[in-house]
Amino acid sequence: MKIKFCGAARNVTGSNHLLVINGKKILLDCGLFQGGGRKKAKLKNQELLYDPKDIDYVLLSHAHIDHAGRIPLLVKRGFTGEIYCTKATKELANVLLQDSAYIQMQDAFYINKKFEGEGVEPLYTDKDVVKAITLFKSHEYTQKFKLDEGIWVTFYDAGHVLGSAIVVIDYKEDNEYKRLTFTGDLGQKYVPIVNDPYQVKESDTLITESTYASHLHDDFSTVHDDLAMLVNDVVARKGKIIVPGFSFERTQEFVYVLHELIDQKRIPQIPIFVDSPLSTEISKVFDKFKDYYDEETFRTFVDKKKSPFYFEGIKYIKKVEESKKLNSVKGSCIIISASGMCEAGRIKHHLKNHMGNQNNLILVIGFMARGTRGRLIVEGRRKIKIFGEYYPLKADVVIMNSFSAHADKLELLDYVKNIENLQNVFVVHGEETECAVMRDNIYNVLKFKGRVEVPIQGEEYEVKGENVRSKIGKRKDKIMGEFDESERVRKIKDKK
């Protein structure tokens, strides 16, 4: 088996890994690179480190754009194979990819109009999305299916977002049965709506995310107390709460907790606006796939014939005219608006209009990647550039990382520790420092005796028997100082 890392290598976005097993070329995810500015993102997203016509299959872990966002581009450039995922992911991907195409088409139109002769084209259009969705095939969790001769795939619940999957590939190579596990994005335990991540018990090779490899999340058991305190404090000073909401999962979890607090009469029933057409559509999908909910959601809402996402006092906004009217709302309210990293969408307008008021609160409930506007807000910059102009940031900024959909340091290590017969670990989907911490913790904390690699973009490895061999040759490695280039090929002890 060969693995080529074509995205999310020492960064968080653009998940994309190419496997070659028994001559078949299989993609794990095909995500969009986000952050770093429009031109840089465009260049990275146009670069596919393989010929799409040669790809046989795509295995999609979940529908987030940084994991699925380049699938229409793949199809546009000649991919005609099959795309496998869970049923919920298929439906969510259709919604999210249509939205992605719309944004790209609108951005291209705006830039070409403003800068005549620029000739900017979107990566793909809505027509490419429609064509791509026809290639999707879905399977339920735990249902092993034959992908090709000597290759079988099983999806397990990753506990990250609705429909997210840990991808397990069992394959026969050189008369030996082997297993590769790809975590996709691994969720944290004990959060609402989704189930806890399934623990894969045995695997030869693991490709794992590392988003929060050096961080510990706040205990979710305190989230109700923390959020109630924040809401009541802002209401007392007649301020507004602006929440950069990730339309998929985070917004639904946040609304879920607000619903509980209102039912418990722990916060006043102030107006709650979900100002995002995308969030509105995704919430409809959530309502459709109730079978994916965890037991707590059934006990709290479903068994009582109640929806977690629709209740008195909440309004989902789709029309631009209604969104603009939010600027003139008197008194306290909560505005949840996309996008989560404050790079696009209506959240930019709400930040511009409200972050200059010291009575207001910007509540951050998700990861902000380096190079994004959201990251600058989290870092405490006092002036934020929006629509080409700088605006003062006087509102309070509070980060609630208990809402994170990613496993933290201890959960990631615990997951690796509980996989038996593990020989090879590849650390991806994390900023450089997080990848390094993850690698060091696997060696030093878990006392792992196999091989741990932190691949760079475009690096290719051969995994065969006891050996893992890098195919890229000599290279500079800024954060892997203790491994010089002569050690790039090492024997791995067989724990079997």
Image: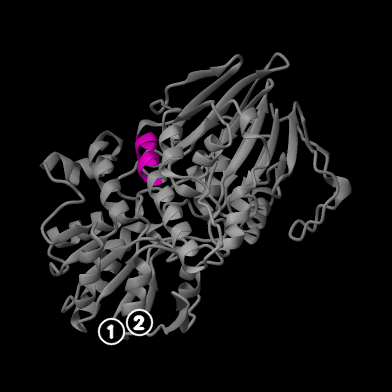
The 10 Å Cα crowd at callout 1, few under 14, some 14 to 19, many 20 or more, is some
Q: Which residue is mark 2?
A: 395
Please identify the dominant SS of the magenta region: helix
Badge 2 element: loop
Residue at 16%, 51% in the rendered image:
310
Kindly state the secondary structure of the residue where label 1 is placed. Answer: loop
Query: Which residue is nearer to you in this view: 136 or 46?
Result: 46
Q: Amino acid at mark 2?
A: Ala
Image location (x, y in percent) of residue 30: 55, 41
Residue 453 vs 352, above or below: the answer is above
Q: Is residue 419 above or below residue 11?
A: above
Q: The residue under label 1 is which amino acid type?
A: Asn
Residues under numbered marks 1 and 2 in contact, where contact means CB atoms less than 8 Å apart: yes
Q: Residue at x 82, y 39 (%)?
A: 490
Residue receiving disc 1: 359
Q: For this rendering, which residue is in front, 203 or 56?
A: 56
**How many marks can you see?**
2
Residue at 82 percent across and 52 percent down: it is 475
Within-10-Å neighbours for mark 2: few <14, some 14–19, many 20+: many
